[in-house]
Amino acid sequence: MTIKLNGSTAGSVALDAPASTTSGANIEFKLPVADGSTGQFIKTDGSGNLAFATATDTNDFVKLTNVVSTTSVDSILHTNLDTTTYKAFRLVFAALPATDNVHLTFRFMNGSNVEGDSNYSWGIMGVSGGSSHYEDHGVGNANARIHNNSGNADYEGWRHVMDIVCQTTNDWTGATSFASWVGNRVDGSNNYRWESGSLYYENDADTDGFILAPSNGQFNKYSYTLYGVKR
Amino acid sequence: MARYKLLNGELVAYTAEEETARDAEEAAAKADKDANGYKEDRRYFYPPLTDFADAMYWNSKGDSTKLEAYYAACEKVKTDNPKPS
């Protein structure tokens, strides 16, 4: 059976019933009581009642925030991240310090509290502009160093892609919060340095955020995007 | 000068307690840099160890030219990045 509506000028639109339904049931649909929003679809409640609804995001890699700013700040924090939904966070980051030749540091957050116990272990491998290699590391530090010296001129600064994993109650004891990154920097004499590294926070504590700060002074410019990677 | 943080994308002033903590962090970082920064700076400019290996090889053959040049390059790095007195 078909209900067919003819267009006023040409063509038509038809609603067709299938030749037969499952088990010969009499199916009845009730249309929504109001229009939905842009991009919504019609769903059923299983009892024939139709309603408009927003599609569930099924992407495993989700953009959480994007920031581009020249407002000077002493630190950049993200707190109360959804560690129930997200197993890891990817930070694509670039920043320019106000003070010449300072390090970039990282710590985890737990709510509004900075995890500042001297339990950060970290390591950086680097290549200088020539053919020299270098390494830096720390054990039991109050923060982790992400990059060595950056200059404060426009063409200098730090830039990296960093994966951050917060320990939660879902993890086994001692899984620890950790992070890894690959990036580069240009120091105060315009020397290019490639650097990669890893850190972990040797505390059996849940974390749900992080703080980045220059070892001295402020960030003058920064641009970053934070993504969540679902469990 | 008041300090600010970017907290979840919003500009927020430091509390007095946070200001004190940040002051202490910066002081510690500066003290460490003043005492040890020359070591970090020197590492980036020392000639590669592969150059040293090559210089040692030629030195064993009786040609000390490369080894002397390597030592001179190291000396320059130390002079350019002096240890604080």
Image (cartoon, rainbow, N blue to C red):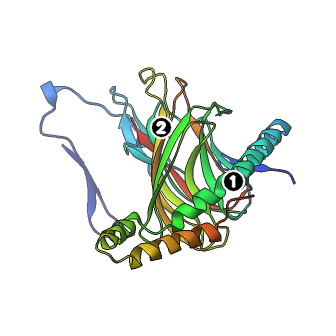
Along the horizontal axis of the image, is A51 left or right of A226? left
**Split into 4 quadrants, where in the image is the N terminus of chain B?**
bottom right
Q: Say what amino acid the circle numbered 2 marks.
A: Phe
Of all chains, the one bearing label 1 is B
Along the horizontal axis of the image, is B26 left or right of A133? right
**Split into 4 quadrants, where in the image is the C terminus of chain B?**
bottom right
Quarter of image, res B70: bottom left
Q: Say what amino acid the circle numbered 1 marks.
A: Lys
Q: Which residue is mark 1?
A: B33
Of all chains, the one bearing label 2 is A
Residue drawn at x 51%, y 73% as measured from the top left: B73
Quarter of image, res A9: bottom left
Q: Which residue is mark 2?
A: A178
Q: Is residue B76 visible?
A: yes
Q: Position of residue A83 (x, y in %)?
A: 50, 33
- Helix or strand or loop: what does disc 2 sit on? strand
Along the horizontal axis of the image, is A10 left or right of A143? left
Residue drawn at x 64%, y 66% as measured from the top left: B81
